[in-house]
Amino acid sequence: MVKWRLELALVLATPVMSAWGCALLAGLEEPPVVHATTGVGAGGGGAAGEGGTGGGTGGHTDDGGAGGTAGEGGMGGSGGAPCVPVTFSVVEAIPDTDTRRPIAITGDATALYWVDEGEGSDEPAIRKLDRATGLASTLAVTTPKRPAATIVLDDLYVYWADSEQEPPCSGNPPPARDRVMRVLKTGGGGPLPVWVNCGRAEQLALLGSKLHWTRPSSHQVRRSNKDGTGVIEFLHDDPSDLDEPFSMALDDTHIYWSDVFTGKIMIRAHDVNTLTEFADAPVNASILKESWVALDDTAVFWSSSEGIYRKSKGPQASTPTRIAPANVAATVRGLALHEDTVYFTESINGAVWQVCKGGGQPQSIVAGQSQPRGIFADGTGVYWVNRGNGTLMRALR
């Protein structure tokens, strides 16, 4: 009986064949376009056998966790569930949004919110779509300011950044040309300034009671209370430390951001004024000078001219893994995470993609889009904006 248990445990602990191996056996010309990855689920521990002292530990493979190894006197656990592409029931333009050139989008349980940079007689504005009624409305008009491709929310407010190119940032004090703003989600009370100065704010991020924004041309990341009080240079004004910070993401311990001049992802602990290089993120400025950053509980994700990468959190973390190659992710203009999946827009090729966080074959959600930009995902589906033809799009589960 002991021998039988041991043989069964060894069988259950054998790793599942990877997607690469399956492709080779099937006679495909190429394996999936991803390096070795880790499955989303780990195998469960084996239950203790009769007289055994403990369960086995779970394993990891390319296609979900393998069966756990047997504990002393116990059998191995079953394999973890692999990440599978999300299936969408419908992909369509949202009707009657009355928008012209949308560039960023986000949402909550009741509404979608987006930035429309306007064109001609159509003024730049911050707009809202009620999910229940389908009615679109304008929360704020930013004229004569041009909004940046960033929009974030808290329970009460919508936040954005806008700017002008003239007058130049000279004189003392400098002209109050560029802004970070907020407006109630209801639209009541009109837009309110959070920060006004000279030097464009590019990307925003919220963490608790604090609002952060990058200023690439000023070599800064700034932070304030959400009402605009307590503004500080969170990362100091020194080109030797900060060149051109662009996109950023924060958790309770660190801030991560992309530097589109050096082509790096950087990291800094909130309580330590020391910057550390986290990973390479090369940018081909002749095509697109952007690199987008997002994170979940365990890993950081970013776009570069060479594709989309994932790396475990922390300054001493593991080597980055490419999860989407450059042929589908060289000009990413929007990056979003939800559950086990990374979603992104590829602007030049006009496509919207998904790929499992652990890697695998990227799957096209839809092609033929007109300059897709910002993207947002939640439990209902994926939402993005097409700047080229002024549409808000959705792929519903």
Image: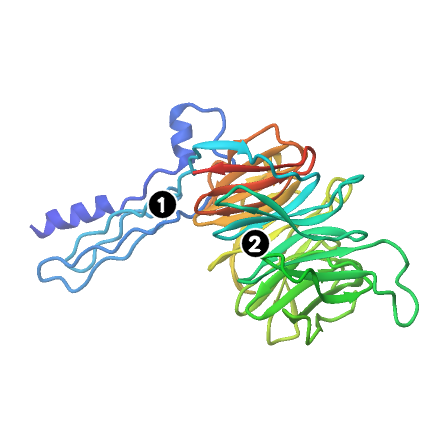
Q: Is residue 348 above or below residue 65?
A: above
Check disc 1: other Cα within 10 Å, few if <14, some if 14-19, many if 20+. many
Type of amino acid under label 2: Ala
| Residue 240 drawn at (x, y percent) | 78, 66
The quadrant holding residue 327 is top right
Considering the numbered disc 1 on the image, is that residue within a helix, a strand or a loop? loop
Residue at the spot 50% in from the left edge and 36% down from the top edge:
395
Determine the CA span between mark 1 and mark 2: 23 Å
The answer to which of marks 1 and 2 sits earlier in the sequence is 1
* Residue occupied by mark 1: 64
Q: Is residue 23 above or below residue 125?
A: above
* Residue occupied by mark 2: 294
- Which is more toward the observer, 86 or 69? 86
Q: Is residue 275 above or below residue 263?
A: below
Residue found at the far left of this picture? 1
Q: Quadrant of the C terminus?
A: top left
- Which is more toward the observer, 97 or 13? 97
Residue at the spot 66% in from the left edge and 62% down from the top edge:
189
